[in-house]
Amino acid sequence: METVIAMKLLTLNEVAEMLRKSPAQIRWMIHSGTAPKSALIGGRRMFREFEVMEWLNAAFEADGAA
């Protein structure tokens, strides 16, 4: 049997607030392929918190910020 690890799921609005963007900007990022990884769960766009954090960390590393 496969082990399932509990993780926090974030809504589109929560991610928009976290990234200081509007929900419309996050939807555009999803459309253009530049948003953190997400999935439709029960008809709602959801993000795994750890993937949003990895996406943020990768953005800082790509910019050469320390």
Image (cartoon, rainbow, N blue to C red):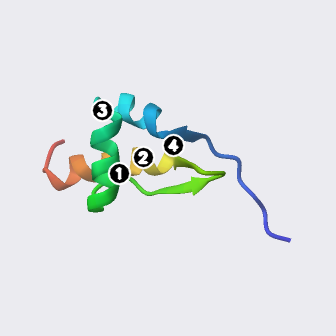
Identified at 71% across, 53% down, the residue is: 5
Q: Residues within 10 Å of mark 2 (few under 14, many from 20)?
A: some
Residue 14 appears at what percent x and percent y?
46, 32
Q: Which residue is mark 4?
A: 49
* Cα–Cα gap, marks 1 and 2: 5 Å
**Marks 1, 3: nearer the viewer:** 3
**Marks 3, 4: nearer the viewer:** 3
Q: Which residue is mark 1?
A: 55
As drawn, the residue found furthest toward the left would be 64
Q: Which residue is mark 2?
A: 52
Residue 65 appears at what percent x and percent y?
15, 43
* Cα–Cα gap, marks 1 and 3: 18 Å
Q: Which residue is mark 3?
A: 22
Q: Residues within 10 Å of mark 1 (few under 14, many from 20)?
A: some
N-terminal of the two: label 1 or label 3? 3
Q: Check if mark 1's residue and mark 2's residue have beta carbons within 8 Å.
A: yes
Identified at 26% across, 60% down, the residue is: 32
Q: Check if mark 2's residue and mark 4's residue have beta carbons within 8 Å.
A: yes
Nearest to the observer: residue 40 or residue 57 = 40
